[in-house]
Amino acid sequence: MVARAGDAAVKERDGKSGADGRGTSHPSTKATERLSLQQPYASDPKYKKYTQQVEKCLNAFDNVHEWADCISFLKQLLKTFQSYLQFKEIPHKLIVAKRLAQCLNPALPAGVHQRALDVYTHILSVLGTEGLKHDLPLWSSGLFPFFEYASTSVKPTLLNIYDTYYLPLQHDLRPVMKSFILALLPGLEEETGEFFDKVLGLLDRLADTVSPVFFIQNLWLVMITMPPARGSALNFLLRRLPALHAEDDITHVVGRDIGLMIRAFSAVLEDDNLLVRRSALDILLQSMRMDSAALKGTQPEDRAILMKAATSVVLRRDLSLNRRLYTWLLGPDDKSEAQTVYFRQHGLQLLSTTLKNEMFTPSEEYAESRPFKIFISLLDKWEIGSPLTEVLIYDALKAINQHMESKSIISNDVAMTASTLLEAVEPSILWKKLLHSVLYSIHDGKRPEAIRLTLFLLRELPVHDDEVRSVHLPIVFAALVEKLLTHIQENSSRVTSLTVRETCVLQQEVLRNMMPEALQQRPKLSDPELQESSTSSSPLVFATTFYGLDPPTISNYRPAAPIITAIEQLLMLCQTCAKYMVQTQGSGADLKVTFSQFLSTLTRLVEVSNVSPDTSPNASRVPPSWLEDMLDCLDMENIGFPLLDHGITLIIAIHRSSRLLPSAPANQKLAVGRMVKRLFRFLRHECAIYHVRAADLVWTLESSTGHHYVESIIAQSLNSPNLYNLEEAFEAFGVLWRLTEDEVSPGFRLKVPMMIVLDTLRHEQPIIRRAGETWMRCSLRSYARILEPIIYDLIDPTIRRKPCRTKIKGKEVQGYIYEQAFDQRYVHHLLEVLLAIAQFGGQGFTKSARSYPINRSNHKPLAHRLETASIDPTTNFLDGLVEILSRFIQSEPKEPHESTAGPLNIKIQLASVDLLHAVVARGEIDYLSLEVLEPVVIGKLYFTVHFRRLDLQIKLLRVLHSLISASTAHLSQSNVLRSENSVSEAGPRTYTMNPLLTQTLMDGISLPHNRVMLQHWLDFVLMAIQQFQPALQGIVSPIVDCLCRQVRAFLADVLLASQPDSVVLGVATDAEFIMLLNAMERLLILGLASQAELSQQDEDSLLQEKSATESSGILGLVSNVFTVDSASLQIDDQLAPRSPGYRSLHEGIRVLFAIWINLVWTAPSSKRSEDDSLSIIYSRTRARCRRALEYLSRVHPSEVLESLVICWDRDLTLYSRDPKQAEDAAFELVDTLIASAHSAVHMICESIVARTPGFPSGSRKYTNSNLSDGTLLKFLEQYLSRLEGPLALQVWGRFIQLAKDVISNVREFRAQTYLLLRCLCVLGDKVTQTTAMEDRRIKKDLQEVFSKLLDACVTFSGRSSESASWIRRTTKESIMNGRSSPVPRGVSDQKAEDKASSSATSLPDNAKPTWGSELPLQITNFIATTVLPNLRKFLPDNDKVASACSSIVYYVVNPAVKGKSRPLDLDPVVVETIKEMTRISAALKVWRAPVIDILYDNRVFNSNTAAATRWKPVVKALFDSDKTSFSDLLSRIASAPSANIFSNRENEMLLRSLNLRRLSFVLFTGEKNHFVTQLPNVQEKLVDILRNVPSPIVQSEVYLCIRVLLCRLSPHNLTSFWPVILTELYRIFEQIIVTVPADESEELPLILSASKCLDLLLTLQTEEFQIHQWIFVTDTVDAVYRPDNWTPHAMFDQLAETVTNIPVPEVKERSKASSGVTFPTSSASISFPSTGQPNKMRHPMLNSLCQIDSIRDLIPFFSHVSISSYESIYATAGNIDWEAVEQGILDDMFDSR
């Protein structure tokens, strides 16, 4: 069988190259010895012949093709050597050693191996011990790695060579000791192996050659660096490492460096192999017990490393590993007690410290949850888990808290592990530690850390364990209550401390998590004596006894159930707080917070106690004067509502369980009155956010007492003589009335205060009357509420009447006669009240009464009385009232009672008539008087507004309305008469609006102090404008603007009040919002109502002046269409006829849009008192906003949609702190207003068409000049992106029609073409995911339109790049310019567009939308990120795909490449474009050519590494898709010299080196083993160059390529390549030792490249190289601990001496900084990681060194590399900084010059 593995490595040159003659010869001692050995044979003719024979034989190796040829070669070579036995030197030994190493390739058969070993045996016998000592690296490089792969038949020969020729070297084996051990250890893998004993004996003798300690130290190094050899090393140690007792010293066995041994054990304990870990634990049990002096004498960080590695075995969940670990931690004794003592004495401190450090400062190598998982696993062993939990659980919780507060992704894993830990840990130990820490924190009063940690545990790690919830949490809760009580009773000022406040929060959390019924009784104690004494112990004493803590001394404890005791103690705490608040006048927010938390906790506890009657607290448990102290505290002015809420809620809860309130009605009413009056203070307007809760508390308080105290208390407050208090009382009662539901029947439950309020409508004092009217306006809620009790009394059964007929002058009149006397004064009073209500309510009163049936009333006796009075209960209130009034009007007293009842009856009738006539009354006054009165009234109104004369405004507004009504009616009648009489005058007379009226109305609406009158003003405005059109049309727009400002101000206040820490209380209610929105909606409609006739007049004027305008040729002007201030308007203002109304519409839409986006209620995480009111405001206002938008959208759909688009485009970020949420709400609103997606898209398309030149405008006479077609297209793109597939299919037809129209009508490129392409990509992506693509028409339309749009965009992009070189602009510059939207296109004159030629559709320059110069960059970016990834979706045809890609390459890629001095430094967008094309198979031929041109450009490596990184996927795709590319690249690396005698040799070498670097870059672009199939060809080329191209510049590229291969291939793939690499590296550095190159020599780049290659090998520490690295560096402990009389053997150590001894030339100064690399002054290049610091990673030392001018620049490297390599192994645990490795390779490839 032909062995191909070594074919690539058998054709290199024979190593004849040497120094170039320009260097200085400074041979070292070894070199001198070699020269002295060769000197006697130099002139011997036979030796020359001997040399020629060997050379001839070696040349024959070039013809080896099969393994049989190898045998022939070896036979001939051996025969040649045997022919000249007289010479004790081997000619060409470097090449001989390389050939023999190649013949030991594992792929070759055993026969070849045997022949090679025969040659080795002969050579070593000829050389003897001295010869082998001098050439140890040459012959060992082949023999050492071979033993692992040797067959059974050849192993004896190999072992014999080791025994016969190597062991006699004795002390000279010291440098090669580690590699020799590595070579032999494979023989110890199987204990039953054939050669096990022989190898074991060989290792024993090897240990004796130097010293056992040195041998063991190298064994530690092997265990650290060679995972495959760990099992064999442990097999050796188990047999040879002595068993040690606790007091035995181990240094005589392992040496002084115990840390090295510790790291070796750490490495094997973390090995993936289970058997390796098991053996490591066996050795720990044997020689490193926990109580051993060896372990205790090591450094703390070393012990931590060992413990960390040992405990990691529990994560494998293997019983055998766990059993050994437990034995190591617990000691050899089998008894649990002895094990626990042993662990506490020797292991607990180390284990807990190690886990604690790892918890708080986790290593980057492992997950953050690792130490917690180890902790959990160790809990399985009770002897370890229990003591460990006691010392570690608190710190573990702190660490978990720290990790979870970081909010990182990893914290989720920590949270899951923490939950598992809490389930596994013993609850009693956990809560013992927590309780002890919390009690100490309370006592200390300064550090609440333990309290916060317990809070974190309860909040973030929910408790599910029933034992915790039923046993530990109740005990902790009761103990905390008592501890707080004693703590505060000692000093009441402590109630304001931080720890007390935090403990209150903890109490609430504990109560929330525990089982409430667990507080009914205490758990039993295990000790009977303690159980008996605990019955009389207080909760705190019991808790400390239960957990084994030191109990405090508590007196005055009355035994009771824990819940009773807790309630009693909390009552005392609340009383203490209340007294302290009264004492300090409630100062300090902290005190209020603490008091509020106490109240909340106590309320919850009382509610829990009410579940069981046995545990309900009785009144005797309530401390004396508790209620009085609480009420005194709650009566304080500076007590906020949340505290009042909690206090009253607690009082109600206690009263329901233990009858807290006084039993005497008078005293009880007094207490209730104090609370109700206090609540009424928070029913004022400035406390709007508390209204709902305050009203609920009022009714709850009344229901808990069982008496109707509230009605009399309110009535008493409404009769206050103080006007200010009276106004506040009215306002508070109004809020209570409005928030009381109809089911309560407030008209009957609150009848007395209601009648007091209604009486004020007729009160003589204007202030009181205004208060009543305000109550009616703002708080009434429904007229039915007040009609029910009044009608109920008006149909009192005592009012008995009988029908009668009265004849008057022959006519009969139907009437009634009262049968008996009744309370006429009361009836008259009721009618007067009703009259006042009717006069006040007007049409609203009538509508409400008409729409409300009487039988809907919740008061059942009302229906019964109606039946008795013969009135149908199903009738409505208005009809019933009219019937009742008609009876009163018709009713008369009997004749005997006429004198007494008559006057009162007349009053009743008058009141009834006034009530019936109130709505229809009108004034009869002449026009001149009207004209005189109106300015006076307006002027007075203006005066009252500004001087806050609120009382006059209502009357004046009514008068003003009547005046305007009479004036307009008079003018209208007059104009009709004039037209009938055909009087020819100037025209009809029109109403002239007073100039002060608009301002008066705006001030009345907008001034803050006038807010209470807002509804009156709005009513007047709405009624007057609507009734008197078009007389008052001019005030619509200013009033709308004013309303918009008001709504914005209200909205800002509400949003501010919604903030968590807001202090804003006085916000607009939902009623006020709805009031303003009602007015705004109606005014917007009214403002646009007359636009139709105005537009018609405008159109007529346009038609009349069209010819004149056309003939004048002035494009931008339209005159005499609509005059404002006698000035002609320019084209941009042609919307003037509609601009007031439509500008108002736009402003209104903006305000409604802001409400829609912001007023979305989301319940907060923690309940607040103001949330109920805010949620009502949010929901009702937003609902009214929606109705307004829906109505406006139905009336003016296009205008509303365009206004929404403008809001979306310009103001989105102004409306909400979350733009994404605002944008979602905007599109949600569009979906709400427009019935279907098709309609929405159609409307947007129509708006786009109206703005696109070249299209007929159709029926759209006007367009919004603030909105451009570009903005509409952007909106359309976002809208389409939100559609589902079926909806996208519905809108497809309309959109594709728009796209076709644009393509066919717009001839030159416009930005809209690009935006259309974006829309098409969004819509097309959705349509292609449906079955619609089976429709040929849709498929055809998509392909055609997409192709045309893409072609237009690409062509424009290419032309722009040619003219403006836009592609050179960076993305940063583009971002700096911002989003450049097109300049809004002015609405062009319709006549001018009609006049324009159909062939010239371009806009004039000033009207063209101008995009920034980044538009081509945006297009290219869009092509790269969206178009190309989806190209196959839109263009299934390969030809069209290729055509599109070809166009992109021609217009985008090629212009970007031209003229680049650095071919790879293209714009990232262009590179991304090419990268996306590489994913399209049909585009291969298109992008392949430019990429190849760039790659083979000789300046390609002038680029920087960042650019090269971007090109990696592109280059990889090129060589993946085109199989000939790689062979073509290899062919360019020609080895044959040029036949042209005139060729430039230097230039030829430069080109060859560039091609070789290209090969390195191509290999670098692949993943691991990506190009492994090409490895034989690559090796062949590299070997060929090494053999035939002596140029240093080319050979230096070979070592760069080898570095790439080391990073991109698995190490075992390079096995056959090692002899060549080692030989060449050996040759280069040996040549330096013999002849040091001169400064600025051509050899220096090659030396630097070879040094970097070795630097990388030492960094990677591959298993294949470790057995050879001793040749170059000292890899034993001698690197650090050098023995006496030490001489360097490793090449780099020799080079350090050789180069250091070279005299420094004095010709020129050489800057130390020129070396470009810095090394530490100490011997170590990598510092040891300290405990807690994450392990450092190995990285090459020469990364920053790019060029050297002298071999001296490498002195720091040569002198430090051995110790740095050793210490990096010691400190980094094998971690490699791959990022630094690859960056170093890239930096050497790309020089950025």
Image (cartoon, grey):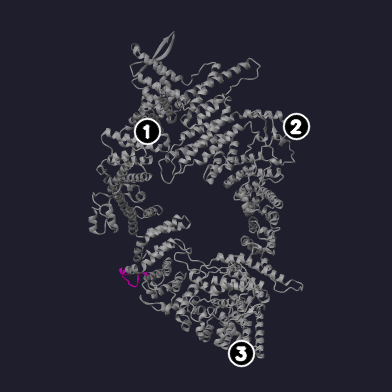
* Magenta stretch holds residue 1144: no
Residue 915 pos. (x, y %)? 44, 20
- Residue 744: assigned label: 1
Q: Among all residues in the image, which is located at the extreme top? A: 809
Question: What amino acid type is highlighted by mark number 3?
Answer: Phe
Question: What amino acid type is highlighted by mark number 2?
Answer: Ser
Which of the two residues, 1700 or 1231, is positioned nearer the viewer here?
A: 1700
Confirm or deny contact between disc 2 and disc 3 (CB under 8 A).
no
Mark 1 vs mark 2, foreground winner is 2
Q: Is residue 197 left or right of residue 1087?
A: left
Q: Among all residues in the image, which is located at the extreme bottom? A: 86
The range drawn in magenta is 329-338
Assign a secondary structure to mark 2: helix
Which of the two residues, 1247 or 1016, is positioned nearer the viewer here?
A: 1016
Residue 766 pos. (x, y %)? 42, 24
Per the image, the residue denoted by label 3 is 87
Which of the two residues, 1292 or 278, is positioned nearer the viewer here?
A: 278
Confirm or deny contact between disc 3 and disc 1 (CB under 8 A).
no
Per the image, the residue denoted by label 2 is 1111
Q: Is residue 386 left or right of residue 135?
A: left
Asked if one can make out residue 1017 in the rendered structure from this viewpoint, the answer is yes
* Magenta stretch holds residue 332: yes
Residue 355 pos. (x, y %)? 41, 64
Dot 2 or dot 3: first in sequence order is: 3
Local crowd size for mark 3, using a 10 Å CA cut-off: few (<14), some (14–19), many (≥20): some
Q: Is residue 1267 above or below residue 358?
A: above
Asked if one can make out residue 816 in the rendered structure from this viewpoint, the answer is no
